[in-house]
Amino acid sequence: MLKQLVRAAVAAFLSMPALTSAAAPSLDTAVHDSIREAFCPKPAGTGPAAPQQSAEPVEPARVFDNLYFVGDRSTSAWALTTSEGIILLDAGFQHNVEGTIVGGLRKLGLDPADIRYVIVSHGHNDHFGGAKYLQSTFKARIVMSEADWEHMVTWPQRGTPAPFPDRDIVVKDGDTVRLGDTTVRIVVTPGHTPGTISPIFEVRDGNQRHYVGYWGGDGASHLDAEGIRTYAAAVDRFIALDPRVDVPLSNHVVADGTLLKLPLLAARRAGEPHPFVTGNQRFRQWAGVLKSCAEAFLPR
């Protein structure tokens, strides 16, 4: 169902002459529907609310002048380039780190040996799975919150177990990761896990500056009522932190519409709006859909 929705939406958007402001509501609707399909409660007997774990490849892409997508059709990884190396956001599954992340960087003309930091959004193996390889192979520093360094080693892994990275950098809410000309603000947003990280950082599109709000923990179907309320409160706090945030991203393509937006970006002409840039109001609406899906699991 989700795959058909994505394909239909892409076809519809590519038929438009440009991504105008009038087309933005249709794109938002498709992204919001994708979130609801993946993360809202399902009718009884229709299966769990969770993203499909597919390693089907996606062509790596330069999305902003300093931000590159190197994920697959399930889990995202993003390479933030700086004047002194690469900050990688999430490390995917162990089984696709070499082909998808490392191979994707090379295909884009980037050197994986330049990875200096890997910011792991949370301690589930679809996001930390490749961290040990990156740590051992390229001496990348691994960044996680205190709570999720602990959570990582106790939470049952999905699919093929991944080796844990050696404990490295511990960050707390309000810390920053600085590399060259780039600063990443660390926001701890508990809920999906006890210490989920949702970074905020600047990206460039020519002479335009934008700010990414990278939501680090999609989905609440595994949480109890207290956990769901914690999740919802974290969303509220996150969207209120920085009014400059105008690019919603996440670590699952079903949550931020990456697969919808990449074809639009490839077809974008000079002077046309950037499909990943929503403005702050639409960013808040996007995060509100994630929150409403979580709250829908509360007992009635």
Image (spheres, grey):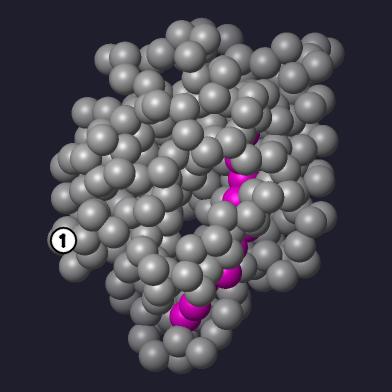
Residue drawn at the location 45% of the way across and 87% of the way down: 206
Residue toward you, 1 or 114: 114
Q: Main secondary structure of the magenta part?
A: strand
Residue 57 figure quarter: top left
Nearer to me, 151 or 210: 151
* Position of residue 159 measured from the top left corner of the image (x, y, whole percent): 32, 14
| Amino acid at dot 1 | Lys
Q: Where residue 133 appears, x then y in whole percent? A: 26, 34
Characterize the local packing of mark 1: few (<14), some (14-19) or many (20 or more) Cα atoms within 10 angstroms.
some
Residue 235's image quarter? top right
Instruction: Tell me the residue at 75%/23% (across/down).
Output: 228
The stretch of residues the image draws in magenta is 196-205
> Taking 227 as reference, is 131 above or below it?
below
Indicate the position of residue 288 as horizontal and vertical percent values. 73, 45
For the N terminus, give its image quadrant. Answer: top left
* Of the pair 225 and 152, the residue shown nearer to us: 152
- Location of residue 80 in the rendering, given as x and y in whole percent from the top left corner: 42, 62
**Relative height, residue 133 to residue 202 (above, below):** above
Residue 47 or residue 205, whichever sits in front: 205
For the point 58% across and 10% down, the residue is 44
- Mark 1 lies on residue: 107
